[in-house]
Image (cartoon, rainbow, N blue to C red):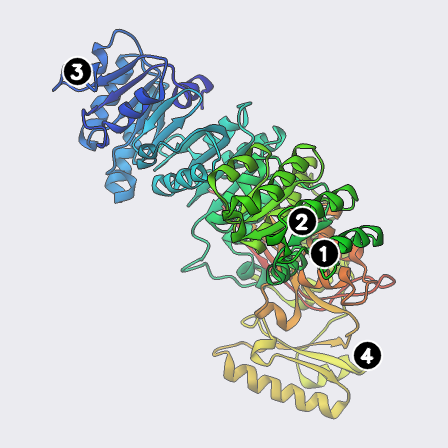
Amino acid sequence: MDRTALDALFSPRSIAIVGASNDPKRIGGRPLNATIKAGFEGPIYPINPNYDEVLGRKSYPRLSDLPEAVDLVVVAVGSRYVESVIEDAAMAGARSLVVFSSGYSELGPDGRIAQDRIASLCQSNQMAMLGPNCLGVINQKAKAMASFTAALDLDLIKGGNIGFACQSGAFGSYFLTLVSRRGLGINLWVATGNEAQVSVADAIEYMADLDEISVIGGYIEGVQDCDRLRSALIKAHDAKKPVVLMKAGVTEAGARAAISHTGSMAGDDQVFSAFVEHYGGYRVSDLDEMIDLIQGISLGAYPKGKNLCLLTMSGGAGILMADAAGEADLALPSPSPEVKDHLSALVPYAALDNPVDFTGQFINDPTLGGQFLTKLSDSNLYDAFVTFVGHTALDETIATPVLETISTLSTQGGAPHFLVGLTTPPLEKLLLQAKVPFLTNPAKAVKLVRSLYEVSETLARPIESLAWQGDPHIEALFDLLVASQAGAEVVPEVASLSFFRSCGISTVMAIRATSPQEALKAAQEIGFPIVLKIDSPQVPHKAKVGGVMLSINSKRELEHACYEMMGKVARRVSGAEIRGFVVEPMVSEGLEVILGVRRDRDYGCVIMVGSGGVMAETSSDIQIRLAPITLQGAISAIERTEFGKAIRSGVLARDYDFEGLAQLMVTLSKIVVSNKRISEIDLNPVLFRQRDKDPIVLDALVVLAPEKVPS
């Protein structure tokens, strides 16, 4: 998109409003009235052939009658008139349009045709178009209110350092109202509607160039162009401007059928989250979280570490915050003995371990909170402070001393402070001036601290390149594997394991047997105890249908297992072709995890790690990253799984080989990136073992994409 056309759209110097109305509450009146009230310094031209004057401004019949070419044309007429307006705008030399009109792609195929037609008309005349079916643009710095959002009627909106782009105008208006009521300021607000031309990604990329913007929020329902969004996220990251995204449509009604666990677990929504995280964005799950995080970033309340101090005048709130700190992996160091002695002298019965409870005595002596905070802050032990004052902040005689202390400490540039409680407008103003985020939910305040820490870490590190030239050795091995499969979609387990061993991955030795007698011979070669699995192309996941039996210790047990297994699978999988069995040694020392990769049509290759074995059927304990992954990126993903957290915290033994499992992830990601015929891979389970033992793959599944037939 041409930058000068976007300048004309997002920061216009002259505006014409087609369909302008004398009623400031109507769609054609709101943008005109609001822009006049805001003090827009450039010319504003109402276009309406029925009036000589609209809201005190001279009205013109057509755009071509204007005395000059305008930067922005706001189209507030019915869809049947839009094409002629665009043609008139092109003849008049306009550079951009905001099209409020509905009746396009949201109505189906016929509407899509009409939308494509007006988009093509704008494109051929080098005009940027926002919409159709959109709520427009608000630029507080330029005082351009090219929108009909009812939020403009509230007189709450003020200038600031926040940029926001959304596909839903109603949601964007609600966001605009909420952040304004929080006392925060908007620089540029864009509602893109149907995105026939200009998208949320275009708006984010534009905002990344604006010095006045420090944080960019976005609400999207779908991504039409992943490459554009990738480019926008990279540009914002390079400009050190966090992008906070909320995406609707997280459930996958009618989700695609997937053969592998990875294909079903790493769904489109999870892959989108991995995409956003990889390119430096931050995804939130709800509106409250979005506004809290944007507030924290806007105020620059970044913790430098994970040592958190919780202060409270309520034991219950302290417990809630401590629980939230544990879930967020934030440390709660106790104050030093010297600090404790000092605080104990102030309130003899106070709980001082962290959370620090300055008790209800705060009501009698409102200076207590400030005295506690000052002493704890002077200890230089903490990276952030969260203070709970509850409803007491509604009484300014009680709350003012502690809030003034928080504000003073915050402005000194040390660890950021966060306030939890109900406050009055004057106290909120005091907090905002001191750049102190304020919330009403104790647990969410603690979560915000963690989120801001993660955002600061993301800003500090470069985006990892996904460039990979391929490995000729791996590619050659894979070609041999494909050639041996005679067009099959699913590669049998024995062949899959053999391929991964050739790639340098440790796997169990698997022997294929076509009969119980051959299975016995294989077991004797391997040595009891063994694992017996069914061999059937219709049964990719064997355990759920009785196709896996563990710890078989004798010839008699094996013979019984073979016939029992064939019977179970035949009954549970109608039409299954049973080709025999797979015999493997029984290996059980280690944690069962799943590793997998899949090729996403929009976002590229992704890799997954999570709790494996039978847990893969039901567990949501997974981490997904874009591939190829780096060693450090893989270690980070493992550490964020539930089993990784349990190991790092000491709940499980600490001597597991994180680097060994991470290296396996690196190799697996390179395998899928090197071979475009790979659709999905499951390694499940993989035994995650202690430092002196490599992780070992116990089962493998490779799913091939259909081979493209030359045209």
At x 45%, y 24%, the residue is 1
Seen in the picture, residue 148 relative to 262 is either above or below; the reply is above
Seen in the picture, residue 478 relative to 158 is either above or below; the reply is below
In depth, the one of 294 and 526 nearer the eye is 294
Residue type marked 3:
Glu
Please, what secondary structure does the residue beneath circle 4 have? helix
Contact flag, marks 2 and 1 (Cβ < 8 Å): yes
- Is residue 15 shown left or right of residue 650? left
Q: Earlier in the sequence, mark 4 or mark 3?
A: 3
Contact flag, marks 2 and 4 (Cβ < 8 Å): no
Q: Earlier in the sequence, mark 2 or mark 4?
A: 2
Residue furthest to the top = 67
Q: Position of residue 54 (x, y in %)?
A: 19, 19
State the separation of the CA atoms marked 2 and 3: 63 Å
Q: Which residue is mark 2?
A: 368
Residue type marked 2:
Leu
Please, what secondary structure does the residue beneath circle 2 have? helix
Please, what secondary structure does the residue beneath circle 3 have? strand
In the rendered structure, find residue 525 and report the number of the disc placed on it. Answer: 4
State the separation of the CA atoms marked 4 and 1: 75 Å
Please, what secondary structure does the residue beneath circle 1 have? loop
Q: Position of residue 459 (x, y in %)?
A: 65, 36
Disc 4 crowd, CA 10 A, few/some/many (<14, 14-19, 20+): few
Q: Is residue 497 visible?
A: yes
